[in-house]
Amino acid sequence: MESGSQREGFRFKDSDIDYMHWPINHRVLWDFSQATLYNLNIYKLILCDSSESPPGFTLLWLPSEDASREALSSCLRINGLLCISSAKFRDNKHTTLGKSDPKIHGPSISGRQNDVLDYDRAFCYVSDFWPPSASSWTERCHSWPPPHVVDVVTRNGSHFVAIGHKLGKHSNNEWTISFFQAEQKLVYCMNHTQFLTYGLLKCFEKEFNKGLDGEEKLLCSYHMKTAIFWVVQQSTIAHWCPQNLLEGFWVCFKILLKWVYEGYCPNFFIPENNLFLNKVHGAPEMCPTPEKRGKMYGILTYIRTVDEVTFNRVSNSYATGTYNQHPSEFCLYVT
């Protein structure tokens, strides 16, 4: 399945294409009682064990020690459980795909298609159940997203991508709980102005990181997405309309500034997961030291002093939006 900014409706010249792959005959469970819902002649079941993992991460283990050859070849014993190691899983995928996919990039295998288009392919597992650690999210959804979207999101469950927490006890073997499908649905239920605000934040992130590589990058697009989600849900802006586009951007900017100052960027679904302390799917490692945070805070504070009229003129020439028949087909073209 396609994921990332292209799926959300953005068309950036320098964007790659992101894909998520998962086996259709494997399912991840949070509790073994959920196994009664599956035909064991068809499905291979995997259980979560997050007892020793940071929020937003978990070990995946095989209760019956039965799975695909691919999964079994990535296993090792942890506390007596046969666990699928995320690091071994990535390495095995990289070896299997061979020369067509030359490098490992976070949880993904990166390559170039027809020597023109860069892409990231993340191989994961799927769960039909909403994570218990994200239960607070449904309780927060009073005004946004609407109830029918919350229902669809939670019924679609989550995914597990092969990357652990850098500071976790089992960092090379843990898996990240991914909400990429939920995030797509939240982007699709944004209104026109909210979507444009998100696009401006992505433009800002690209400009902020221009010329930087790897660990030099202090912010990533996932931080921008997290900011717009929090601001929209908290109803910080009374009216999301084109006349308030700039106001919405600066509210998101200030919450980013606050997170950088505090060194804490709360995941939208699991707020206990500090996104500044781990790798974000499809992004370089983000673990800013106090020195880096100080530098980042200084730069952001300086940017905040830029004349808003000047910024408005620049932003208007930077991006244009056009609607198609369906909100999910609305695209922001950036040149």
Image (spheres, helix red, strand yellow):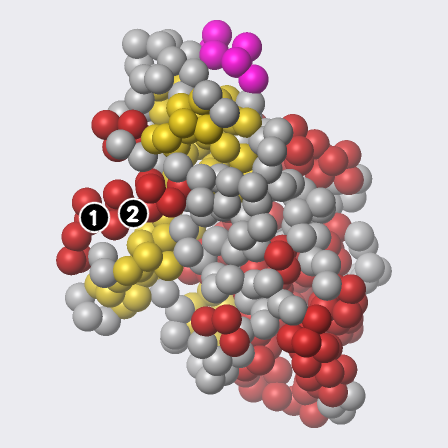
55 with respect to 77 (left or right): right
Other residues around mark 2 within 10 Å, as few (<14) / some (14–19) / many (≥20): some
The quadrant the N terminus occupies is: top left
Q: Residue at x 15, y 58 (%)?
A: 99
Rendering quarter of residue 45: top left
Answer few, some or many: residues within 10 Å of disc 1's Cα (few below 14, many 20 plus, some between 14 and 19): few
| Numbered disc 2: secondary structure | helix
Indicate which disc residue 77 carries.
none
Q: Position of residue 198 (x, y in %)?
A: 61, 65
Mark 2 sits on what residue? 91
Q: Main secondary structure of the magenta part?
A: helix
Asked if the magenta segment contains residue 96, the reply would be no
Q: Identify the residue shown where x is 59% and y is 72%.
A: 218
* Residue positioned 26% across, 45% down in the render: 93
Q: Is residue 103 left or right of residue 79?
A: left
Q: Position of residue 271 (x, y in %)?
A: 71, 46
Q: Secondary structure at mark 1?
A: helix
Up the image or down, 135 lies above or below 220; here it is above
Q: In the image, is residue 35 part of the stretch drawn in magenta?
A: yes
Q: Are marks 2 and 1 in contact (CB under 8 Å)?
A: yes
Q: Is residue 275 visible?
A: yes
Give the x, y percent position of residue 81: 45, 22
The three-letter amino acid code for the residue at tag 1 is Thr
Q: Which mark is residue 95?
A: 1
Give percent across and percent down for residue 46.
43, 23
